[in-house]
Image: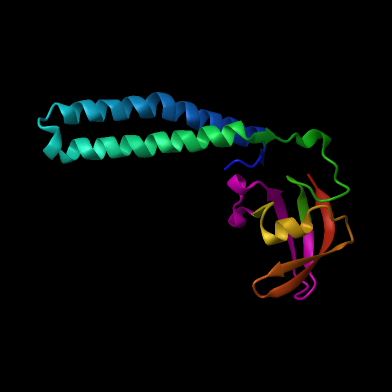
Amino acid sequence: MSTITYVTKETFEQMLEELNHLKSVGRSEIAKAIAEAREKGDLKENAEYDAAKEAQGHHEAKISILETAVAHARILDTSNMDTSKVTVLSKVKITNMGTKKTVQYHIVSENEADLKLGKISVSSPIGKGLLGKKVGEIAEVQTPGGIMKFKVEEITI
């Protein structure tokens, strides 16, 4: 995960909060579990100790991944965004030229994508296809089912 990830200020703050929680509360809970398991005797045949050590490894890996994500995060300020073309954090209303169905998507980073909330990743086929498009332009998107055409109807923040 060495690529830059664009996030909102709120998402960045959530990432920092989770990282701080994992480093403080999470580490102390795991240390306590290891200490309790160690008190139960022979470590070679202590499944509880093995499980606690494995949990510690997973926990530290999660911390490492989150630290990398925070280091590569770039906060986007929506107050000075250009709405003349589609960019990361744009809300874009598009019409599928094949079905004539109109939908609105919020173009976000991979971490924030949630299709149920109408948030699509900037690195998704539709997200990539819409980037840089202006109102009235047609985006041709290569999908597994073939090329789809979307007309950009509106761009907002």
Look at the image and say whether residue 82 sits in the magenta stretch. no
The image shows residue 96 at horizontal and vertical percentages of 77, 69
| 50 sits to left or right of 118 | left
The image shows residue 81 at horizontal and vertical percentages of 82, 39
Look at the image and say whether residue 111 sits in the magenta stretch. yes
Q: Residue sitting at 52 percent across and 29 percent down?
A: 17
Q: Residue furthest left?
A: 41
Total marks placed = 0
Camera-nearest residue between 25 and 103: 25
The image shows residue 109 at horizontal and vertical percentages of 65, 46
Quarter placement of the C terminus:
top right
| 64 sits to left or right of 125 | left
Camera-nearest residue between 137 and 116: 137
From which residue to which does the magenta span run?
Answer: 93-117
Image position of 92 with respect to 21: above or below: below
Q: Quadrant of residue 39?
A: top left
Q: Residue sitting at 35 percent across and 37 percent down?
A: 57
Q: Residue sitting at 68 percent across and 34 percent down?
A: 74
Q: Quadrant of residue 61?
A: top left
Camera-nearest residue between 8 and 72: 72
Quarter placement of the N terminus:
top right
